[in-house]
Image (cartoon, grey):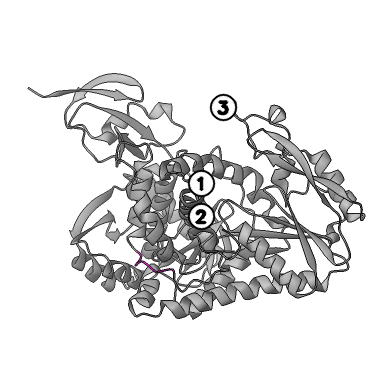
Amino acid sequence: MTDKLTLNVMGKTMEVESGITLQELSKKFRDQFSYPIVLAKIDDNYRELHHTVTHDCKIEFFDLTSRIGNRIYIHGLVYVSLLAVKELFGKAKDLRVQHSLDKGLYIETSFPLNETKLGQIKEKMQEIIKEDMPITRVNVERKDAMTYFGKMNDLSKVGVMNYNTNTTVTLYRLGYLYNYFYNYMVPSTGTLTHFDVTYLNDRGFVLQFPTVYHYGSIEPYRHHKKMYEVYQECRDWAKIMHLENASDLNLVVSEGRIGDLIRMDETLQSHKLLSVAKQIFEKKNTIKLILLSGPSSSGKTTTCRKLKMYLKSFGLNPKMLSMDNYFVDRDKTPLDEEGKPDYERLDAIDLTLFNDQISSLLKGEEVLLPHYNFLLGTKEFKENMKLEKNDILMIEGLHALNGAILKDIPRNQKFKLYVSALTELNVDNHNRISTTDNRLLRRIIRDNRTRGYGVEKTLESWPMVRRGEEKYVFPYQDEADYIFNSALIYEIGVLKTYVEPLLYAVPNSSSNYEEAKRLINFLRMFLPIPSEDIPKDSILREFIGGSCFHS
């Protein structure tokens, strides 16, 4: 007699036969989802859909509108695009996933690309998806995997596995092609029905897909020229330094050359910020305001203070203001969908007071500045400010680049600076390092060090932080006169030494356990890097401590 299981699936109690696969079970619930189901959670643990159910449990399914589902959906699309390229142009041809761009991924080809070839790639991807080819998970000996990727001339994966101490590794098979992804994978190509591609240049294209923020449809591609150029500049430098993948950085560490790399990278970053100060100085008779914004944990505070120091070296006297001090009183704060105060909306700022005071300051008038008391939820007026000769006003805030603020001040009197950690390093050719993950690791460390927050608190709040960035920061990046990259090519190895012990503290019963485990698995690909060679004025010190700009 077949054993029966009692399951709670998506809030519904049901009886099924033991040994049923999650994929078979998911068919009963697909009408509840806008897109194909790609992953499941059994009790507190994520499971791929090939997994069999053998005990009474609670089950939840996910499509690409979830954060975890979207991540593995993207990995599936990358895999399909790679197979399409090899079937069309030969097994020796390859792709390199570079970085996010607009709401997609910029991917470069190992061969000259044109719009006709990209059209062929798209058609082949659609064929592979229509065939609903299975993507199977296999465990193989690490040495065998290294031999396979060596024969495929995928030396980036050979390098990563060289620093992996596990006896076996998990690969995925699609058709004749094996690949490695440091995350879960969709069960078959038939789940990857929603995608598009946009030709960018003869080196690459943008792979587009629905996101957790815009999942109703795939928006037409909008090119962000400045962001693309900053990424390319960083990537070009990384190529010169022979530092494109995790294994390249690990080699530098293992050979004892990391101190020199740290000094080179820090010098380069400081030189770029110094050049910003020089640009502002050369227009000192015109520029009256420096407006600085960027996403969470991008190093805005240190950037502000270093820029202030550099401007002083040119004879200017910067004075700093934070837009956070202009919040409306708490009883007037707009509420989010859950009825909680939403400090990230533009109307959470007292724009009338802000605009009036900045205009008065630029006219040479003295104003009494507010200081927002977060404990009481009110503004307190304590400090006077007046701009003297050679003074220049620096304003940092979430909405600083939004054209809706300071509309009466001519654009040529403003210098807008966008700060973000644009990671130029990859894990390997097909696994990028998300700039979001880089910033999340920074934030976990800083929250724990300066606020005493546990990892779970930071992980719990991160989706809300990301939603705010998507609404109020990223749409205005093109407004910037200069995009400053605050990422350091060596930093993941340093962050690893600080954040890894914190991540291990997340219990497996926690709703954030799987996210902590994902980050731990990611960090395993990097050798630890000590912090003693990091200078006191480094942006990284804002997070790990020891900065000359902070206590």
Residue shown at 52%/44% (left/top)? Answer: 211
Residue bearing the label numbered 2: 439
Residue type highlighted by circle 2: Arg
What is the spatial separation of the Cα atoms under label 1 and label 3, in whole angstroms? 25 Å
Q: Is residue 220 above or below residue 223?
A: above
Q: Horizontally, is 215 left or right of 21 in the view?
A: right
Q: Are marks 3 and 2 in contact (CB under 8 Å)?
A: no
Q: Look at the numbered disc 2 and give the secondary structure of its residue.
A: helix
Quadrant in which the C terminus is drawn: bottom right
Nearer-N-terminus badge (3/2): 3
Mark sitting on residue 451: 1
Q: Horizontally, is 368 left or right of 52 in the view?
A: right
Q: As rendered, which of 212 and 270 lies closer to the eye?
A: 270
Residue bearing the label numbered 3: 338
Q: Horizontally, is 423 left or right of 373 in the view?
A: left
Of circles 1 and 3, the one toward us is 1
Q: Are marks 1 and 3 in contact (CB under 8 Å)?
A: no
Q: Position of residue 167 (x, y in %)?
A: 18, 62
